[in-house]
Amino acid sequence: MAASTSSISRLGFRHHQPLVPNSGSPSQPSGSVSFHSGSHCFYFKPLEATRQLQLSRISVVVKAESRSEEMQVDTSLSPRVTAVKPSKTVAITDQATALAQAGVPVIRLAAGEPDFDTPAVIAEAGINAIREGYTRYTPNAGTWELRVAICQKLKEENGISYQPDEVLVSNGAKQSIYQAILAVCSPGDEVIIPAPFWVSYPEMARLADATPVILPTSISENFLLDSKQLESKLNEKSRLLILCSPSNPTGSVYPKKLLEEIAKIVAKHPRLLVLSDEIYEHIIYAPATHTSFASLPGMWERTLTVNGFSKAFAMTGWRLGYLAGPKHFVAACNKIQSQFTSGASSISQKAGVAALGLGYAGGEAVSTMVKAFRERRDFLIKSFGEMEGVGISEPLGAFYLFIDFSSYYGAEVEGYGKIEDSDSLCRYLLDQAQVALVPGVAFGDDSCIRISYAASLTTLQAAVERIKKALLPLKSAVPSFFYR
Ligand SMILES: Cc1ncc(COP(=O)(O)O)c(C=O)c1O
C-alpha cells in the first residue's frame, strides 16, 4: 500500500515529519498497514477487497487509528466523485456571471436556458397554486391531474399511449434521466452515447457504475449517428442507447427514416433499451419534424421517453420534467425517487398543467419563442458562414450552434500564448472578446465550440462583432485553402 505525506495531510494530520512504513507490531489491527511519525503511530485499514477500489483513486483510509490526541477526520471522498467531471457549462456560466457582477460587460452565450420569461398564464397558475394553499407534498409520481395531462399530450402530439402509472414527474428532466440510468444499468453495463452529447449523459452513466461508450459523429453528417457504426458497437453489455433530438449541443434533428433504421438495429438486441431525450421537441424549425422514438414499431416496450418544461416553456427554474415508459421501468424510477427527492414541487406541477393547456405544441406562446429562435439562428449561420475556416452544420432545432473553429487552433497570440483547443479558444474569447461560450470538448468534440442563441438579436450582433475581431489575430493559423 502506498501512503504519502500528502495523502495524510489531506486527512488533517498536523505533522511535518516523513512517514515511515512499519513492518507490523503485535498491537496493530489485522489487515492494516501502519506508519510511524515522531511519537505517533498510524494504522490504515484498506477498504475491503470486494469493493475493488483503486488505491490511487481514493484516500487510502477508511479508519485511521492513532495514539495522537488530535482530532482525526477522514476526508476521503467516494470514488464516484473522483470519477465524475464537473459540468463545464455550469463552470463557464458561473465564471461569466462573476465577471458580469464585477462590472465586466460579458456577453453570456454559454447557458442552456431560454432568455424569455415563463409565459404569463403559466406563471399565474403557479401564483394561484400558492394563494390557494396548494403547497403540500404531492404523490411521489406527480399529481394525477398532471400525469393525465402528460398522457394526453403524448398521445396527441407524439402518437404514444401511456397510462398515468406509466409516467413519473420529477424535478427536471435531468433527474428523470439520471433515475432512468440508475434504474436499468448494472455495474459494467454499457451506455451508448452519440457525440457530441449533452454533458451530463456520460457522467450520469459513470455515477451509475456503468460504462459510457461514445460514438463520434461528424459535422459533414450533421452530427447524426451512423446506424452501421452503432451496429458494430453493440454487444451483450449494451444496455442503454441515449438519443437526443433535437440535440444539445448541435441542434441536429433525427429524421424519421434514420430513427427507423436505428430501431431495426435496436430490435436485434433484447437487452438494449433506448432513452429518448425529447426536451427540445417544440424548438424545431420547419420543415423539420420531431419523431418520438417510442412511436416506432416495436419500440414502445423498450423506450424511456424523457421530456420537460424547462426549454419549450421557458421554465428552467421551476424544475419540472418527466419520464414515460413501460410500467416496470417507471415503477423502478419511482422507487428511486421516493427515497431521493419525493415528488416535484406542487406549485410547479400546477404550472405544468397550465403549460400543457396552452394548446398543441405549446400554442402561440411557444411558437412566438420558436420564431425568435429561428431568426437568431439564421442570423448566426449567415454571420459565421461568411468567415473563413469556420465549419457549420445545419441546426434544425434547439437553440445552439456547434461551430467548428479548429482551423484557428495552433495560432500564437502575443501576450496570451497558443490557442490549441476548444478550451483555450473559449478562454481566449472570454478574455479578449468578453463573450462566454462553451468549449466543444465538454460535449465530446474538441474541434467545435457551442454558442447558445438564447439571447436577443442585438446581443448576438454585438457578440459576433466581438468574436470576429478577437479571431483576427488568429487568422494566420487558418490554412489558405479556406480562403475564398
Ligand atoms: C438535452 C438536455 N436534456 C435534459 C436537460 C435537463 O433539463 P431540466 O432543466 O428539465 O432538468 C437539459 C438541460 O440543459 C438538456 O439540454
Image (cartoon, grey):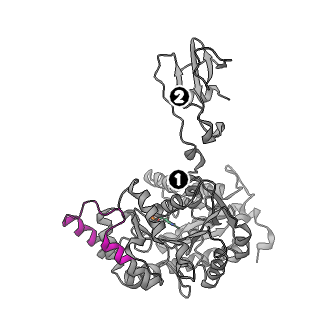
Q: Residue at the location (36% across, 73% down)?
A: 147
- In front: label 1 or label 2: 2
Q: Nearer the viewer, residue 233 or 254?
A: 233
Q: Is residue 79 left or right of residue 318?
A: right
Give the percent coordinates (x, y) of residue 183.
51, 60
- Three-letter code for the amino acid on which mark 1 is drawn: Ala
Disc 2 designates what residue? 63
Q: Residue at the location (47% across, 19% down)?
A: 70
> Of all residues shown, which one is farthest toward the bottom?
287
User: For the C terminus, which image quadrant?
Assistant: bottom right
State the extent of the magenta-drawn residues as a range: 124-150
Give the percent coordinates (x, y) of residue 133.
19, 63
> Of all residues shown, which one is farthest toward the top?
39
Q: Secondary structure at mark 1?
A: helix
Q: Is residue 136 magenta?
A: yes
Q: Is residue 374 visible?
A: yes
Disc 1 designates what residue? 91
Quarter holding residue 316:
bottom left
10 Å crowding of disc 2: few (<14), some (14-19), many (20+): some
Q: Is residue 324 visible?
A: no
Give the percent coordinates (x, y) of residue 63.
53, 28
Q: Residue at the location (65% across, 81% down)?
A: 258
Q: Secondary structure at mark 2?
A: strand
In contact (CB < 8 Å): disc 1 and disc 2:
no
Q: Is residue 120 left or right of residue 2?
A: left
Give the percent coordinates (x, y) of residue 438.
58, 60
10 Å crowding of disc 1: few (<14), some (14-19), many (20+): few
Q: Is residue 140 magenta?
A: yes
- Three-letter code for the amino acid on which mark 2 is drawn: Lys
**Up/down of 260 relative to 14, above or below:** below
